[in-house]
Image: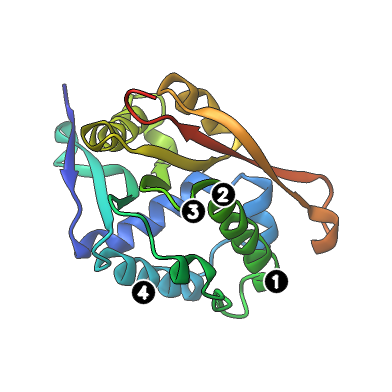
């Protein structure tokens, strides 16, 4: 099979942000946060943020490469592995506002980040767990199984330690996560009218029980 998993290196961060931009370009919520798409300036800020996360001892970046395309990176995931309970002070620490520059809707971005933080604290505080923070596949390579490989990697790690897994999913991703044992538990809803768009942006909060639960 031409697709294989590999650990990412710091030099992959620019490709990571490019794949992410392509993967979410047609998502309504992405169009709220980036009215004119993700500009080079926004991407540069995101690359620096990804590099910072890359060096966090709890984060693991993995990728899928296509060996028939000279090991081109076509998909990626960032898992956060918390084998010990996170300290209460960490959960309660106020989040510093994120600023992706004038080309981004930082109000919408921070509203989303705050909503995610609140759900994560409510559902996962006080227990070790694995968190899938990012899962992106380049649109040209979707439906080839890369996403499933990246999810399976994390669930295998979780099962080895008896940990629960948690994530937030767009509507497009829910089917894959259900196949991997995740259950819907709550939902994040953001009214896009606040930012001049129509509709409600919904992101499903999902948990995969620990092995033996």
- Can residue 34 be seen from the camera position used here? no
Query: Which residue carries the number 1 mark?
Result: 107
Per the model, the C-alpha gap separating discs 1 and 4 is 20 Å
Q: Secondary structure at mark 1?
A: helix
Query: Which residue carries the number 3 mark?
Result: 125
Percent x, y for residue 82? 32, 52
Which mark is in front, 4 or 2?
4
Q: Residue at x 47, y 49 (%)?
A: 22
Which mark is in front, 1 or 3?
3
Per the model, the C-alpha gap separating discs 4 and 3 is 28 Å
Q: Of marks 4 and 2, which one's residue comes earlier in the chain?
A: 2
Q: Secondary structure at mark 2?
A: loop
Q: Is residue 11 above or below residue 169?
A: below
Per the model, the C-alpha gap separating discs 1 and 3 is 26 Å
Q: Quadrant of the C terminus?
A: top left
Query: Which residue carries the number 4 mark?
Result: 48
Q: Quadrant of residue 199?
A: top right
């Amino acid at each position: 099979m031409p697709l294989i998993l590999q650990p990412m290196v710091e030099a992959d961060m620019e490709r990571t942000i490019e794949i992410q931009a392509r993967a979410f370009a047609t998502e309504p919520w992405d169009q709220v946060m980036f009215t004119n798409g993700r500009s080079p300036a926004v991407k540069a800020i995101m690359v620096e943020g990804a590099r910072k996360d890359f060096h966090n001892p709890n984060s693991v970046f993995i990728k899928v490469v296509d060996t028939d395309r000279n090991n081109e990176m076509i998909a990626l995931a960032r898992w956060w592995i918390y084998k010990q309970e996170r300290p209460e002070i960490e959960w309660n620490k106020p989040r510093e506002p994120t600023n992706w520059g004038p080309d981004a809707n930082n109000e919408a971005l921070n509203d989303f980040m705050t909503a995610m933080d609140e759900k994560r604290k409510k559902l996962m505080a006080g227990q070790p767990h694995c968190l899938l923070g990012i899962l992106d596949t380049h649109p040209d390579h979707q439906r080839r199984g890369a996403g499933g490989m990246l999810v399976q990697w994390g669930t295998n790690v979780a099962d080895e330690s008896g940990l629960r897994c948690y994530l937030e999913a767009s509507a497009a991703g829910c089917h894959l996560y259900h196949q991997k044992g995740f259950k819907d538990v709550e939902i994040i809803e953001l009214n896009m009218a606040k930012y001049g768009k129509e509709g409600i942006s919904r992101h499903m909060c999902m948990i995969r029980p620990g092995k033996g639960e």
